[in-house]
Amino acid sequence: HHHTHPCHPPSFTTSFHSLTFHHSHFCHISPSFKHTMPREIITLQVGQCGNQIGAEFWKQLTLEHGISPDGIIQPYATKGSDRKDVFFYQADDEHYIPRALLVDLEPGVIRRIQSSEYRNLYNPENVYIHSQGGGAGNNWGSGYHQAESVHEEIMEMIDREADNSDSLEGFTMLHSIAGGTGSGVGSYLLEKLNDRYPKKLIQTYSVFPNTKYSADVVVQPYNSILTLKRLTLNADAVVVLDNTALNQIATNRLNITNPSVSQTNSLVSTVIAASTTTLRYPGYMNNDLVGLIASLVPTPRCHFLCCGYTPLTIDKQNQLNIQKTSVLDVMRRLLQPKNLMVSSSTRKGCYISVLNIIQGEVDPNQVHKSLHRIRERRLARFIPWGPASIQVVLSKKSPYVKSAHRVSGLMLANHTNMHSLIRENTDDFDKIYKKKAFLNNYKEADMFRDDVDLHAEFDESREIAECLIQEYKAAESVDYPQWTPNTTSAYR
């Protein structure tokens, strides 16, 4: 049993190398600064939740890049310095198409997208709806099995998109882990992408279920733990979006009673768009995905990130009552647990890494002052075995979108208390698995025909979640660099 040292308060001695500003008298500008070719990213939206979030994300991106809902570039946006081609490709002079694949096993959500004002934005060849259209019935096994049976069609779409890029950096997947399609098809695609494109980065935005209230779906814990295995083994970074926290933010911070799915999804799309700004507006550091992930994920398995955003608004009319936002306000608020989109509080445990993406008109001196203030007040506790620094990236704001605040900020952080969120999911899993409840639903899938196979897969997924919990706990200790998982599973 290791003696756990308390987490360190942040010392910013090492932080200024990551504070790379556009002002050379501040510090050396890192070599990643040269304007390299944009590295493209392909977005896979899978299942009902993934396609709902995706629709909001593309709405936001078209606005920020001055592209109409039909994909036509607006006359005022032709000369911009933004990189449209990371997420879009140009079909002809003025026509931009998202590098997105819309995948679902039932037609409802995608049909709504196809009858919305954005119906001409997407490439129709990039839409896959299963021909039976019966969905996955909230069953991971069914989703996984259906994906397996049509994988050639889906992989062909992905390969075609990949061939369509000059220098593909990786894939982003939008999905939820609790249902059947986002979880089962999502899991299958994560494995396949890993095999087929071993050198490409895979990042996900994964919506975790509301564990605080009774599950909408009784088998949600099974779906979540089976998907968590793939997120652990087959993704480079997972941005965890937690429905429990999103509902709390909408209710408590935005005073919305019974927030609708579209309202919480609009919070999610704000975060996804903000987390990609450094890729889309070149000039500062971290203008590729590998740089973003490397700064947040020092050890490969602990790659589950939480995020916070401020100032939050959903309703555009409602923006008048916003507090004045200085850089310090933004950076301080980002560290407050109530602005986190994850319900595992940052009050316990410590930060492994923090990256603040600050958008807007910002004076670098203010950033240095704010960092100093945060350090003095010990507002963030860091791990004892690595550099305790808050990294700050300044990012341009889209010139085409008016906003009521001068400065806004997104925090992406790797925090050891992520283990408590995973623990909530394993506890829910254990409750039903120890009674072997509802396993019959899963036996319809080929991979689970045999009880032995079913139990082997469920047990291994549960063990991998346990390893992840143990590793996040171990990361709080000064001995962590010597830690090894006690497991025979694939986690090693």
Image: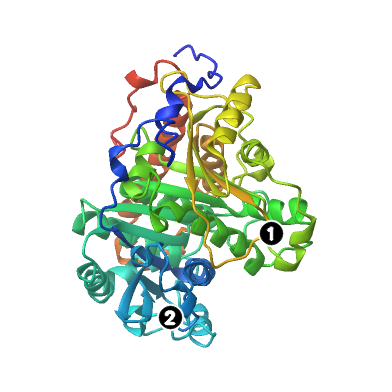
Q: Earlier in the sequence, mark 2 or mark 1?
A: 2
Q: Amino acid at mark 1?
A: Ala
Q: Quadrant of the C terminus?
A: top left
Residue 145 position, x and y percent, is: 33, 67
Residue indicated by mark 1: 404
Q: Quadrant of the N terminus?
A: top left
Mark 2 and mark 1 in contact? Answer it, CB < 8 Å.
no
Residue 364 position, x and y percent, is: 53, 37
Residue 117 position, x and y percent, is: 54, 85
Residue at image point 49% right, 73% down: 66
In this rendered view, identify the residue nearer to me: 394 or 185: 394
Residue indicated by mark 2: 71
Residue at image point 68% right, 39% down: 329
Residue 89, image quadrant: bottom left
Q: Is residue 163 above or below residue 396?
A: below
Distance in Å between CA atoms under marks 2 and 1: 26 Å
**Which secondary structure lies at badge 1?**
loop
